[in-house]
């Protein structure tokens, strides 16, 4: 590890390879020692009480000395992830224009339309680019339209790619598209860093997106793009529009779908053992029918059909609930993405009360993707427990304060029987003399490995089978010890090992689907492939 002395680096491009191995005498204190310095940085981090201050400190450290930053991340994953990522990254995005210090990432604005190529060409490491996280800031976590402040989420996701999958820092491009914002508070804020107008029309956005994607893959031919936190309609629209043309996936639809299927599988096995109900006959109620809700529903339906259910049977195991209640055909006009799971077997008056819907559908699993804080009231939790010996309750909205319930409430009102995962981290609980651990059903377990597999196989597109492979691999990755603790997801400290396993499964799925362009990997045995993947991981 080197202690960097390089001055200001524009756009967060980290010149690791060019950093001086040994600083010139006199330019650092005489007894500066790298491993002590890592401890010093950790101590400085821990001395701050506010998580946003910790975020600012780490963001500064990453720019100054990426090696030490990523070393700290890897050695303290459980402590640092909630600061550089969900939930603190949500606050960082809200305050992005106020805490901004230096450029990082690439901004492509509607004003660049017609001229996007020349903006992309300004990126300092054209040849190195492999993974880009692209947001338009229109639905950041559950926080709504944050405009150009959404850059924070692209940066946060890519930090996890680097820490969690060993993607080289210089191969990553965080991108925020500035298509305006409908957030009046930001439009009125003199510090706001984006264009000061409402979001452009759908038609203008479409022309912009076509040009942007076309130029991205011309400028960076080896790239894979992760779409992040687009508003629901556009998340589906642009995934559909580009998924067969470019190597692109949507993290909120597919990454969340995969991670929740994985946690559900591990939970459903335990629940089925307790209830005697077959794994394939679970009924799932989705409270929240946006990109994540529908994405997870599609992933679960696909799983049930793989297990021998007909498509129709699988579809009927899923109930969607939005802000107007149960989603059913007779209710009236629905947006396109809600139609598929809309019920045709109910035609009574609108069913708006979650307790009534639970009573009607008798779900074995309740998923929250609504951003309605506290929607899973004690009564709702108790109703789930009354119908199921081990109820599956996943309040998945991010960040923490938007969660549908806390882990403590879920434990208390199910007398410790709950099988729980949330989108944001919750502390463990003591119950009846046992320690109970909450799962974190966050796409952070999926996208690093999915992306790593995709770029190593040089895929031309990201197929559903690749996403599914990542999910099944994650579900399988629990160790005996983790299972005995009742965990639904592996410990985050094992993220690199898990990302490598996921990458391997993704590469094999890409080969089966014939979307890979790296023939050499086809010739490798599984163990050779895994060794190859580990060898490719950048280590700080
Ligand atoms: O960023 C996260 O923590 C998970 C996610 O994609 C979202 O909530 O939009
Ligand atoms: Mg997201």
Image: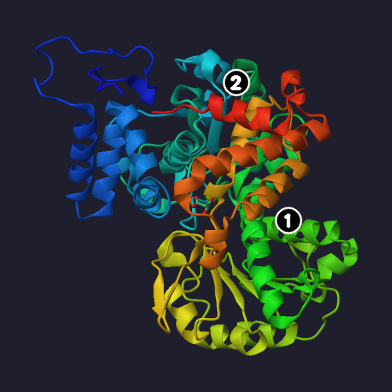
Disc 2 marks which residue?
114
Where is residue 205? Give x, y as percent: 62, 37
Vertical side of 357 occupied by 176: above or below: above
Q: At x 72% / y 45%, what residue is drawn?
A: 469
Q: Nearer the viewer, residue 298 or 71?
A: 71
Where is residue 35? Give x, y as percent: 24, 32
Q: Nearer the viewer, residue 243 or 419?
A: 419
| On-image quarter of the N terminus | top left
Where is residue 304? Give x, y as percent: 81, 62
Q: Is residue 302 visible?
A: yes
- Asked whether the beta carbons under mark 2 and mark 1 sit within 8 Å of each other, the answer is no
Q: At x 57% / y 55%, what residue is drawn?
A: 479
**10 Å crowding of disc 1: few (<14), some (14-19), many (20+):** many
| On-image quarter of the C terminus | top left
Q: At x 23% / y 27%, what residue is drawn?
A: 34
CB at mark 1 closer than 8 A to ligand 1?
no
Q: At x 46% / y 33%, what residue is drawn?
A: 162
């Amino acid at each position: 590890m080197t202690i960097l002395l390089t001055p200001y680096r524009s756009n967060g491009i980290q010149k690791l390879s060019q950093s001086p191995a040994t600083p010139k005498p006199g330019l650092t204190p005489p007894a500066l020692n790298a491993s002590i310095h890592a401890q010093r940085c950790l101590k400085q981090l821990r001395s701050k009480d506010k998580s946003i201050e910790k975020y600012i400190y780490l963001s500064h450290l990453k720019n100054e000395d990426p090696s030490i930053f990523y070393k700290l991340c890897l050695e303290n994953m459980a402590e640092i992830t909630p600061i550089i990522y969900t939930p603190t990254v949500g606050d960082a995005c809200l305050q992005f224009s106020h805490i901004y210090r230096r450029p990082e990432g690439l901004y492509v604005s509607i004003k660049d339309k017609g001229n996007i190529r020349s903006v992309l060409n300004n990126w300092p490491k054209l040849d190195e680019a492999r993974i880009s996280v692209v947001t338009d800031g229109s639905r950041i976590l559950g926080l709504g339209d944050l405009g150009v402040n959404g850059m924070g989420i692209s940066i946060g996701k890519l930090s996890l790619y680097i820490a969690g999958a060993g993607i080289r820092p210089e191969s990553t491009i965080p991108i925020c598209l500035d298509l305006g914002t409908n957030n009046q508070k930001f439009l009125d804020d003199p510090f706001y860093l984006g264009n000061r107008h409402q979001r452009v029309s759908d038609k203008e956005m479409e022309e912009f997106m076509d040009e942007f994607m076309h130029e991205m893959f011309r400028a960076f031919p080896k790239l894979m793009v992760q779409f992040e936190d687009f508003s629901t309609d556009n998340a589906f629209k642009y995934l559909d529009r580009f998924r067969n043309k470019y190597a692109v996936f949507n993290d909120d639809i597919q990454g969340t779908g995969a991670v929740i299927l994985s946690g559900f599988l591990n939970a459903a096995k335990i629940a089925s053992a307790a209830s005697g109900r077959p794994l394939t006959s679970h009924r799932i109620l989705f409270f929240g029918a946006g990109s994540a809700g529908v994405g997870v529903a599609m992933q679960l339906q696909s799983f049930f059909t793989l297990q021998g259910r007909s498509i129709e049977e699988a579809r009927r195991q899923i109930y969607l609930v939005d802000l107007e209640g149960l989603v059913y055909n007779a209710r009236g006009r629905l947006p396109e993405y809600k139609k598929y799971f809309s019920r045709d077997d109910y035609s009574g008056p609108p069913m708006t009360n979650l307790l009534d819907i639970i009573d009607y559908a008798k779900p074995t699993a309740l998923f929250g993707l609504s951003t309605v804080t506290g929607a899973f009231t004690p009564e709702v939790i108790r109703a789930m427990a009354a119908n199921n010996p081990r109820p599956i309750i996943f309040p998945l909205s991010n960040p923490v304060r938007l969660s549908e319930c806390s882990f403590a409430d879920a434990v208390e009102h199910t007398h410790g029987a709950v099988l729980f995962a949330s989108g944001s981290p919750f502390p463990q609980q003591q119950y009846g003399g046992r320690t109970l651990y909450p799962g974190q059903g966050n796409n952070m377990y999926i996208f690093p490995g999915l992306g790593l597999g995709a770029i190593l196989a040089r895929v031309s597109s990201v197929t559903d089978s690749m996403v599914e492979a990542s999910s099944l691999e994650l579900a399988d990755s629990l160790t005996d010890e983790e299972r005995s603790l009742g965990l639904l997801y592996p410990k985050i400290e094992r993220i690199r090992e898990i990302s490598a396993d996921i990458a391997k499964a993704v590469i094999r799925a890409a080969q089966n689907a014939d979307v890979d362009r790296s023939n050499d990997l086809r010739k490798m045995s599984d163990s050779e492939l895994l060794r190859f993947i580990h060898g490719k991981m950048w280590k700080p």
